[in-house]
Image: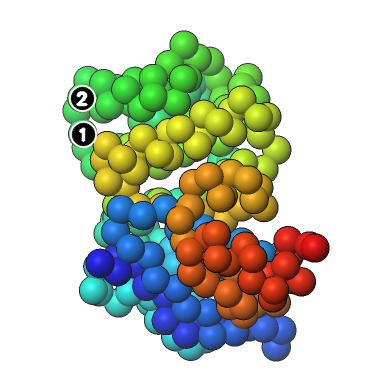
């Protein structure tokens, strides 16, 4: 079942093409990867999906509903969550307080919210740091915190933008484990951007490869990684 679909999306900035007819389909309950060299259009694609940018042409469909042009808060309310290349954490708030932020507009009882927050922090191996300030934890821990905070809104699809960049190997394994656990036990769907090819290959059965704003390959990960166009554009011989 196609859960999230991008259909022939174009986006230009000052006449420079960032996306050139990009299409992809993400099945419900799957972990789908997007790879490509710097400047390929990966983050622009995420920004179009979650409403930061409106496309110049094409459409985005989520659960059979077109969401093209909706605002980020509207798309988030529909069930699409997102992390960023540089983790966005409230540095002067504790980890537990950070976790509670997405619940403010939902008016969820504090006790119930804290229970959920602590469960997610435990899953990420961060519960022992719940009273630490955001500024006091490492960059990798901030990425884990942002990831878990996204889950407080219980999204159906999570867009992970370079979750492994600048993260030490131990925390990369933790991020991979948490993604697998959420996918397996809660049937969460993921769309993942990363330059960390070993981690992508471990997580994703399906890949879309972008280069210069265009799709150059798509399909099963093992097949895509041996595609000559992908090797020439990105992976290297």
Position of the N terminus by quadrant: bottom left
User: Is residue 3 left or right of 138 when viewed as pictured?
Assistant: left
Instruction: Identify the residue under disc 2.
Output: 112
* Residue at position x 62%, y 41% in the image: 164
User: Is residue 91 left or right of 76 when viewed as pictured?
Assistant: right
**Depth check: 139 or 40 in front?**
40
Circle on res. 190 = none
* Residue at position x 62%, y 77% in the image: 216
* Residue at position x 51%, y 29% in the image: 174
Q: Is residue 227 above or below residue 33?
A: below
User: Is residue 86 left or right of 105 when viewed as pictured?
Assistant: right
Q: Circles 2 and 1: CB distance less than 8 Å?
A: yes
* Residue at position x 48%, y 64% in the image: 220
Q: Position of residue 102 (x, y in %)?
A: 35, 40
One can see residue 153 in this view: no
The answer to which quarter of the image holds residue 11 is bottom right
One can see residue 7 in this view: yes
Q: Position of residue 33 (x, y in %)?
A: 51, 58
């Amino acid at each position: 079942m196609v859960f999230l679909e991008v259909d022939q999306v174009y986006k230009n900035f000052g006449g420079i093409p960032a996306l050139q007819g990009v299409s992809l389909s993400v099945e419900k309950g799957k972990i789908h990867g997007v790879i490509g060299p710097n400047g390929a259009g990966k983050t622009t694609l995420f920004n179009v999906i979650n409403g930061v940018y409106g496309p110049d042409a094409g459409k985005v469909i989520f659960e059979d509903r077109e969401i093209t042009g909706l605002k980020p808060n509207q798309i988030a309310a529909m069930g699409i969550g997102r992390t960023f290349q540089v983790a966005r954490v409230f540095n002067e708030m504790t980890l537990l307080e950070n976790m509670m932020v997405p619940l403010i507009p939902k008016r969820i009882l504090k006790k119930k919210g804290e229970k959920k927050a602590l469960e997610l922090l435990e899953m990420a191996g961060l519960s022992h740091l719940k009273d630490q300030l955001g500024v006091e934890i490492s960059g990798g821990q901030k990425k884990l915190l942002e990831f878990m905070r996204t889950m407080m809104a219980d999204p159906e699809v999570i867009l992970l933008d370079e979750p492994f960049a600048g993260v030490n190997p131990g925390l990369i394994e933790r991020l991979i484990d948490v993604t697998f656990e959420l996918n397996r036990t809660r049937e969460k769907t993921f769309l993942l951007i990363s330059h960390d090819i070993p981690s992508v290959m471990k997580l994703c059965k399906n890949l879309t490869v972008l280069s210069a704003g265009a799709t150059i390959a798509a399909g099963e990960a093992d097949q895509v990684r041996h595609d000559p166009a992908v090797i020439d554009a990105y992976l290297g011989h």
